[in-house]
Image (tube, helix red, strand yellow):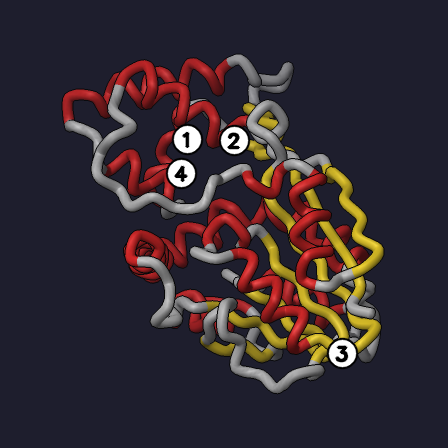
Amino acid sequence: MQSNVPEHLATFAALEHRGWQQVAAEYGDHFAAVTLQSAGALLDAAVVHAGTRLLDVACGPGQITAAAADRGAIAIGLDFSAVMVAAAARRYPGVRFTEGDAQALPFAPETFDAITIGFGMLHFPDADRAIAEAFRVLKSGGHIAFSVWSTPDRAVGFQMLTDAVVAHGRTDVGLPDGPPVHRFSEPETCIHVLRTVGFVEPEVVEVPQTWHLDEPGALFDVLRRATVRAGALIRAQEPAALERLSAAVRSAAEAYRDTDGRIRLPMHAVIAGARKP
């Protein structure tokens, strides 16, 4: 991370990096099926097609990068976690992946035709800086698109944990302060940040997504094992509170049981896109 990052955000960045090094495999196994549902819309918003030179920032397990390559794009996936980069390369051996910082991209100005950021914005200590870096390495006429979770009432899985912690645990557990999780869930914020950096013609859409679970207890287990911010919050709770938290999340998820017995949680995405003039 850059040396001028404020101390509290540097601490947050260290938490994020350590966390993604630890949960890379679990995240790919459990969240790819959800986030992949909006990958096509994300690539459409970035105007990715055959021959597009694409940088997929915060590529994670690599599914968006690979989907772009399937379209014929010249795609590179970038992530700050070496473990995640290695996992993506194993999963998609024909696609290029590299380690790097979204806030200090290791590329020359005007290198790419398109940039995508799939669900990475809430994990950057300075998301505005990441957008500015995207602007720098994009060619004139190039497009950016990023996806984030929608508002808590539209992406309910994480909010179930938050509600359970407020009711049965502690929110003040000594974790470093990070950017607001839902900062970019509102279209006005996305548009403002994109325009401030210099992008034009911003557009924001919501894409429906559904998290399919076989049983309600799986939600708490996946949040604990396969996420960074939510997982850290769970692990910081007192042992006596964990069963109460698990039961509360399980009860909340049970309300979304469908007629076939499966749990179907709304986990809608917001996608923002714009063009570099």
Q: Which amino acid does label 3 sit on?
A: Lys
Query: Is 58 situated left or right of 210 in this image?
Result: left
Give the foreground label among 2 and 4: 4
Label 2: how many residues lie within 10 Å, few (<14), some (14-19) or many (20+)? some
Q: What residue type is labelled 2?
A: Leu
Vertical order, 34 against 264 (above or below): below
The mark nearer the N terminus, 2 or 4, is 2
Query: Image point 63% across, 27% down: which residue?
Result: 154
Query: Is 118 situated left or right of 250 in this image?
Result: right
Residue 227 percent across, percent down from the top left: 40, 45
Q: Do the residues labelled 4 and 3 touch (CB within 8 Å)?
A: no
Label 3: how many residues lie within 10 Å, few (<14), some (14-19) or many (20+)? some
From the image, tell me which residue sits under label 1: 218
Q: What is the secondary structure assignment of the residue under circle 3?
A: strand
Q: What residue type is labelled 4?
A: Val
From the image, tell me which residue sits under label 2: 213
Label 4: how many residues lie within 10 Å, few (<14), some (14-19) or many (20+)? some
Vertical order, 172 against 80 (above or below): above
Q: What residue type is labelled 1?
A: Ala
Q: What is the secondary structure assignment of the residue under circle 2?
A: strand
Measured in 3D between alpha carbons, the distance from the residue under mark 2 to the one under mark 4, in whole angstroms, is 10 Å
Vertical order, 243 against 123 (above or below): above
From the image, tell me which residue sits under label 4: 222
Q: Looking at the figure, which quarter contains the C terminus?
A: bottom right
